[in-house]
Image (tube, coloured by chain):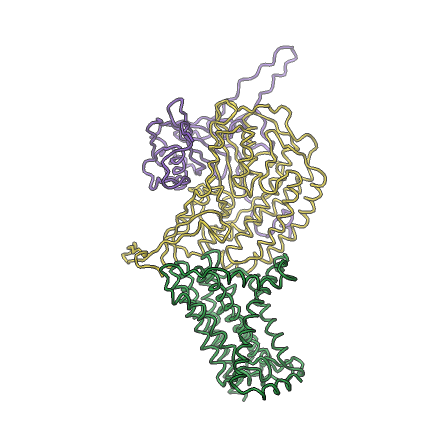
């Protein structure tokens, strides 16, 4: 009954192995893998006895965690932002991005939109996460606000089906190629898009 | 009688005609699914296509996020998934603290973990009772609620609410725990372990239940990944993905616990994942109470007016149902520009349509019960 | 002593009035039982679930069934538009009447059977099949998809479970040599070791036979774990979805009356009927004790187990119970041939 030591109820629950190491090992931002709660990244002052102002070292450049993927990823400090990589792509590249990340083994977290009314653009944000290691990746794109259309990625990730319907509900973004772009959360006959910044009610 | 007009004749792939009719499951249910409508196209007893129709409890939480300050939106987070409310608040305050670079005191982090795990146990108990109610066993629901009452009483003493706690605040907690809570929680852990053993012998080992859920509703790893399913759904399919271990947050790295993973991918695997998780949560609570550090429960320099710097910030937690993530887009004002809530039940339910094709109706219901859905989580 | 009073009363009244008295008594008994079995069920369910159950209405909730009946009586009897109104109204009555008629041949005590028919057992099973037809009519005439699916399930379930039940009963007829229920009880006189349950020198698998009969009785009356027909979490109320008020009330009563009949039959066939376990002071009291113990076990099982899967239920009947009951039948006849 030594499985009780682990507090388990059955003897044959396998203890899974985790790969929590970062895909690369950046010098200062190993916060996600280190066994301490994430601290804000402030570089240590150089140990100088002279009474000079401590010079803050420039913030370390986080390397791209996915260098082999042909997308413009930038490494992001996870402790500050909550994701590891960020890429801004053109709207016609989102399907390609989805396919590349699918090949990497990532899973679709969510698809959403942000209405930048002042800039006349809508941003479509695709979040992906990896089911085996600490890797959360964001792919963004901007589309014009008065004619928001973008390709659907539901062929790559079937889970995108509902996320895209919801984004269409809230923002009016049309996902080309989507099999069923009817209102998902709003009533079936809704023709308004509540999360637009000019929605008045 | 089913009128002739209601039966539709389709030609199946092998050329044979098949008569189907559409039946609605809900939105009012005698079972405790919540307001979900599933439009099922049935061929006799077999499901041809099951299409969930959501939106019956859509409250537009994300719009509310754009009209309220960060502190004002905090109670909303509890109401997204009311059964696992602590963890949802944790995600939101975590995102704000991450953006403000606030250092939460260790005592507050430990108490957050302890109360989140208690909430996880109470959520799993409700799932367990409701799942068995779906399958026709009426009694375990009452046993589960009996245990849950003890958790709710303990949490009510420190937070003031039984279900939708707004206990966490930006920077820590608003109320410290007292000795009565610690004693009560230890007593609860001591009496819960034999109860879990009893549930195992009474229910988990019951042959009728085993015949109902073993090999029913298989979900593969690939399907989980493609649909973004997380939580016990993906852990029951052999992938040991738990946000507490893969993207550790709060004080979880200092706790020693196992993430139960089962390979089979059927409803029994998801069932066992949740039962084991309850046992593991008890372990975490015990460790938390043993190692609880002294100190304040609120960070020192919490700004009066919470304004996040411009940019977007994310925080993910392991809620009872899976991965819950918050993405706050801020433009340096007191109210967020956009609050996106990534809820686990939506991703978990999205695979139901593909997974239930060709199943018998009771099997599909067992599958849906084992996905542990809370509909306000889907609809927000 | 009671017997002599009873015989005296019998000698005063001519036969038709005796019959009327009996039938009225049976209807009162069935009515009162159907109502108070609801109380037993609710209190039993509550206690199994660690809660008190009905306590408000009357002492320990004993007036609860009266309150339920008053509620059901006060509701409007709605017949859905488009439903076949004659069949819709007839279905509950068709379900209740065979039970009442079957109960007329059960020997409640010595000379306490309404009609001591020589083919009593056959009559009970003949009337049992009307049950199935009533449920089918109710489901079909409701013009509701849930009802028709549920009615189809009930029919297949009942037909599947009638077969092993009849095979078991044929075994018992062979063992006892008669279809007259009073005779069967009289044969089990003496102590409890004379009861048919323990008659293993004729049929070594007699307890198995009893178990098969019990399971078939649960399935015939659509009780959990065989209540796919009214699986509440799936099909709302199944066959009874469209029935309101007393229409549903009659179905409900008929279900409890069926349980009563099944347990009474099990008592008569296997447990000695009105015979006392110690050989003396036989009478109707022992019959009622045994019957109510069986009913309590039926309630207990309902609140303990989840529902079986529908094909599991049918598999149990076709693949397990029918071969088992055939085997006991052949075994019994072999034993009787060899050792008689």
**Residue B255 vs residue B340: left or right?**
right
Q: Residue at the left extreme?
A: B15
* Vertical order, C46 against A32 (above or below): below
- Which residue is painted at 42% across and 56% down in the image? B361
Name the residue nearer the viewer: C92 or B298.
Answer: C92
* Vertical order, C317 against B64 (above or below): below
Task: Give coordinates of residue C184: x percent, y percent.
Answer: 55, 83
Task: Give coordinates of residue B100: x percent, y percent.
Answer: 56, 25
Task: Give coordinates of residue A105: x percent, y percent.
Answer: 43, 38
Name the residue nearer the viewer: B3 or C17.
Answer: C17
The chain whose colour is yellow is: B
The chain whose colour is purple is: A
* Vertical order, B160 against A46 (above or below): below
Query: Which tint is chain C?
Result: green
- Examine the rendering and report whether any part of residue C318 can be seen: no
Write down the quadrant of residue A73 in the picture.
top left
Task: Give coordinates of residue C56: x percent, y percent.
Answer: 63, 58
Query: How many numbered dots are placed on residues in this image?
Result: 0
Name the residue nearer the viewer: A130 or B364.
Answer: B364
Q: Is the N terminus of chain B in the top left, top right, bottom left or bottom right quadrant?
A: bottom left
């Amino acid at each position: 009954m030594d499985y009780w030591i682990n507090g388990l109820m059955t003897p044959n629950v396998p203890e899974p192995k985790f790969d929590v190491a970062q895909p690369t090992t950046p010098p200062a931002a190993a916060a996600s893998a280190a066994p301490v709660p994430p601290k804000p990244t402030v570089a240590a002052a150089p140990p100088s006895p002279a009474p000079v102002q401590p010079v803050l070292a420039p913030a370390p450049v986080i390397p791209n965690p996915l260098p082999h993927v042909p997308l413009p990823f930038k490494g992001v400090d996870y402790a500050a932002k909550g994701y590891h990589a960020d890429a801004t792509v053109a709207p016609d590249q989102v399907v390609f991005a989805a396919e590349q990340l699918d090949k990497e083994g990532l899973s679709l977290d969510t698809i959403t939109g942000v209405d930048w009314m002042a800039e006349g653009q809508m941003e479509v944000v695709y979040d992906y996460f990896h089911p085996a290691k600490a890797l959360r990746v964001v792919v963004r794109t901007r589309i014009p606000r008065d004619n928001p259309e973008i390709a659907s990625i539901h062929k790559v990730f079937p889970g995108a089906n509902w996320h895209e319907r919801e984004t269409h509900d809230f923002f009016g973004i049309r996902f080309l190629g989507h099999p069923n772009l009817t209102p998902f959360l709003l009533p079936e006959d809704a023709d308004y898009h509540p999360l637009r910044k000019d929605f008045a009610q | 009688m089913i009128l002739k007009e209601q039966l539709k004749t389709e030609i199946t792939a092998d050329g044979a005609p098949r008569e189907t009719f559409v039946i609605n499951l809900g939105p009012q249910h005698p079972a405790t699914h919540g307001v979900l409508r599933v439009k099922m196209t049935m061929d006799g007893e077999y499901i041809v296509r099951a299409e969930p129709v959501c939106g019956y409890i859509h409250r537009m939480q994300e719009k509310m996020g754009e009209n309220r300050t960060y502190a004002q939106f905090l109670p909303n987070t509890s109401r997204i998934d009311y059964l696992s409310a602590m963890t949802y608040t944790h995600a939101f305050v975590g995102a704000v603290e991450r953006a403000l670079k606030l250092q939460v005191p260790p005592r507050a982090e430990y108490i957050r973990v302890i109360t989140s795990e208690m909430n996880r146990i109470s959520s799993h108990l409700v799932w367990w009772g409701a799942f068995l109610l779906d399958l026709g066993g009426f009694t375990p629901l009452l046993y589960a609620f009996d245990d849950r009452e003890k958790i709710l009483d303990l949490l009510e003493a420190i937070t003031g609410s039984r279900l939708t706690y707004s206990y966490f605040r930006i920077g820590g907690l608003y109320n410290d725990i007292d000795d009565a809570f610690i004693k009560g929680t230890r007593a609860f852990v001591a009496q819960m372990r034999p109860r879990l053993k009893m549930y195992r012998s009474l229910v988990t080992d019951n042959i009728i239940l085993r015949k109902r859920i073993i090999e029913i509703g298989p979900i593969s790893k690939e399907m989980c990944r493609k649909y973004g399913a997380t939580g016990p759904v993906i852990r029951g399919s052999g992938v040991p993905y738990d946000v507490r271990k893969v993207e550790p947050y709060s004080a979880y790295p200092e706790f020693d616990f196992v993430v139960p993973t089962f390979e089979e991918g059927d409803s029994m695997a998801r069932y066992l994942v949740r039962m084991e998780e309850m046992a593991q949560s008890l372990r975490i609570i015990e460790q938390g109470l043993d190692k609880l550090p002294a100190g304040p429960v609120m960070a020192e320099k919490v700004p009066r007016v919470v304004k996040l710097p411009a940019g977007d910030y994310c925080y993910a937690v392991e809620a009872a149902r899976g991965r819950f993530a918050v993405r706050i887009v801020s433009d340096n004002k007191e109210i967020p520009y956009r609050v996106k809530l990534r809820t686990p039940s939506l991703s978990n339910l999205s695979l139901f349509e593909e997974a239930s094709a060709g199943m018998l109706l009771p099997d599909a219901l067992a599958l849906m019960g084992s996905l542990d859905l809370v509909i306000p989580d889907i609809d927000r | 002593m009671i017997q002599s009073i009873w015989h005296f009363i019998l000698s005063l009244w001519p036969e038709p009035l005796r019959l009327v008295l009996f039938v009225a008594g049976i209807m009162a008994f069935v009515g009162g039982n159907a109502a108070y079995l609801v109380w037993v069920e609710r209190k039993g369910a509550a206690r199994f679930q660690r809660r008190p159950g009905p306590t408000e209405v009357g002492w320990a909730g004993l007036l609860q069934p009266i309150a339920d009946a008053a509620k059901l009586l006060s509701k409007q009897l709605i017949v859905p538009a488009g439903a076949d109104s004659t069949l819709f109204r007839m279905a509950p009555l068709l379900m209740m009447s065979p039970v009442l008629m079957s109960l007329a041949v059960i020997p409640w005590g010595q000379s306490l059977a309404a009609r001591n028919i020589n083919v009593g057992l056959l009559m009970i099973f003949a009337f049992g099949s009307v049950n199935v037809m009533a449920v089918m009519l109710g489901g079909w005439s409701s013009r509701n998809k849930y009802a028709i699916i549920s009615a189809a399930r009930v029919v297949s379930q009942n037909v599947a479970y009638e077969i092993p039940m009849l095979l078991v009963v044929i075994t018992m007829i062979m063992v006892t040599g008669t279809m007259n229920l009073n005779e069967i009880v009289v044969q089990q006189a003496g102590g409890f070791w004379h009861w048919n349950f323990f008659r293993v020198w004729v049929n070594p698998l007699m307890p198995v036979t009893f178990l098969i009969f019990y399971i078939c009785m649960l399935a015939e009356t659509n009780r959990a774990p065989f209540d796919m027909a009214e699986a509440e979490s799936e099909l709302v109320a199944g066959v009874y979805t469209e029935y309101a008020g007393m229409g549903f009330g009659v179905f409900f009563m008929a279900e409890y009356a069926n349980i009563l009949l099944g347990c009474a039959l099990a008592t008569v066939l296997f447990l000695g009927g009105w015979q006392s376990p110690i050989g003396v002071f036989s009478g109707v009291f022992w019959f009622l004790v045994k019957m109510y113990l069986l009913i309590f076990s039926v309630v207990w099982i309902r609140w303990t187990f989840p529902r079986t899967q529908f094909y599991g239920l049918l598999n149990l009947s076709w693949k397990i119970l029918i071969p088992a009951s055939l085997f006991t039948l052949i075994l019994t006849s072999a034993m009787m041939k060899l050792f008689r």
